[in-house]
Image (cartoon, rainbow, N blue to C red):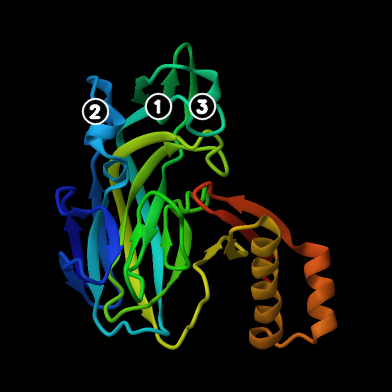
């Protein structure tokens, strides 16, 4: 299988079938996507968010055309490695969970050293992950900022880190996969809407799974599968996630309906993604 890399300059600010691919690959090829942080650097030098443009904070590298991918298929994306080389923390007035606690923009380049990020006199472990990843929608274009969509986008899932396999539904021929918004560290659900935003690279092995129709992206990590529901309301996202877990147990694993219900009752964990969209994940252990 071939190995490729894509420079950070080969990027886009949306997901769309109209954006020409920068690379065409075969199923099973490995691609390293390099990402930048120029928007945060500009902000640190005094430029306004308006002058920079919100879309530029979440530029995605790509897109990549996967040969043979067609609507109704899925991409199996193994996250092999994520490396970060520079990180920032940004505090914006009236933005995110603590935006009301400041009246001025504050930007901090966060030193990275020996596997840790240094915040003043303390340090936290670096745990790099992918904030934004998606494919082209069937029609129109999708934001890389908000909301997130059934085709991905700015999902900010803490679990999208090395060792995780992400399954993405395909909506257009070739899929047009793109990714960006790397984080050096992030709390679950990105509580302040800003993590330790980072420049770096992500290495993905991308394979095609024919006739795997998914309503939303899906994750597998260790011995757990994460069924994702997205909706405007929490209750609806919760139900969508649980319905997928139930249907998987009944239709794929062959369990009787009541047994599937009982297994979910006994073992299923519910977790949150986001915050660009209400995302709920039903997490089932394998058996």
Q: Quadrant of the N terminus?
A: bottom left
Left or right of 276 in this view: 175: left
The residue drawn where x is 35% and y is 28% is 88
Q: Tell me which corner region of the image, top left, top right, bottom left or bottom right, holds residue 284.
A: bottom right
Q: Position of residue 286 (x, y in %)?
A: 66, 70
Q: With respect to residue 89, does 186 lie above or below? A: below
- Say if mark 1 contacts mark 3, CB within 8 Å: no
263 or 272: which is nearer to us? 272
Q: What residue occupies the far top of the structure in this picture?
A: 121
Q: Which residue is mark 1?
A: 89
What is the number of the mark on residue 41?
2
Question: Marks 2 and 1, how far apart in space?
Answer: 11 Å
Judging from the image, what secondary structure is the residue with disc 1 in? strand
The residue drawn where x is 46% and y is 17% is 103
Q: With respect to residue 20, does 40 lie above or below? A: above
Q: Earlier in the sequence, mark 2 or mark 1?
A: 2
- Total tally of numbered discs in the picture: 3
Q: Which residue is mark 3?
A: 99
49 or 67: which is nearer to us? 49
The residue drawn where x is 63% and y is 85% is 252
Judging from the image, what secondary structure is the residue with disc 2 in? helix
The residue drawn where x is 58% and y is 56% is 279
Question: Marks 3 and 2, how far apart in space?
Answer: 20 Å
Q: Position of residue 65 (x, y in %)?
A: 23, 73
Other-residue count near label 3 (Cα within 10 Å), few / some / many at <14 / 14–19 / ≥20: some
Q: Earlier in the sequence, mark 3 or mark 2?
A: 2
Left or right of 152 in this view: 66: left
169 or 150: which is nearer to us? 150
Q: Position of residue 210 (x, y in %)?
A: 40, 86
Q: Earlier in the sequence, mark 1 or mark 3?
A: 1
């Amino acid at each position: 299988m071939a190995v490729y890399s894509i420079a950070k300059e080969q990027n886009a600010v949306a997901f769309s079938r109209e954006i020409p691919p920068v690379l065409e690959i075969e199923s099973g090829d490995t691609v390293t996507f390099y990402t930048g942080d120029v928007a945060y650097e500009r902000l640190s030098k005094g430029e306004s968010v308006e002058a920079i443009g919100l879309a530029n904070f979440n530029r995605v590298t790509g897109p990549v055309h996967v040969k043979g991918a067609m609507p109704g298929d899925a991409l199996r994306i193994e996250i092999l490695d994520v490396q970060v080389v520079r990180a920032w923390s940004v505090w914006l007035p009236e933005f995110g969970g603590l935006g009301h606690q400041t009246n001025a923009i504050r930007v901090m380049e966060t030193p990275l050293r020996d596997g840790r990020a240094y915040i003043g006199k303390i340090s936290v472990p670096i745990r790099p992950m992918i904030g934004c990843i998606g494919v082209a929608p069937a029609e129109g274009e999708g934001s890389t900022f908000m909301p997130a969509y059934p085709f991905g986008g700015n999902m900010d899932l803490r679990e999208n880190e090395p060792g995780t396999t992400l399954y993405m539904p395909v909506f257009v021929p070739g899929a047009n996969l793109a990714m960006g918004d790397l984080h050096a560290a992030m709390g679950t659900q990105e509580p302040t809407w800003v993590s330790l935003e980072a420049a770096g690279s992500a290495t993905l092995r991308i394979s095609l799974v024919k006739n795997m129709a998914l309503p939303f992206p899906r994750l597998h990590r260790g011995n757990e599968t994460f069924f994702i529901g997205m909706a405007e309301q929490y209750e609806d996202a919760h139900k969508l996630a649980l319905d997928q877990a139930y249907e998987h147990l009944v239709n794929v694993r062959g369990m009787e309906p009541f047994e599937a219900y009982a297994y979910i009752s006994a073992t299923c964990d519910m977790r949150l993604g986001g915050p660009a969209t209400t995302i709920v994940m039903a997490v089932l252990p394998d058996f």
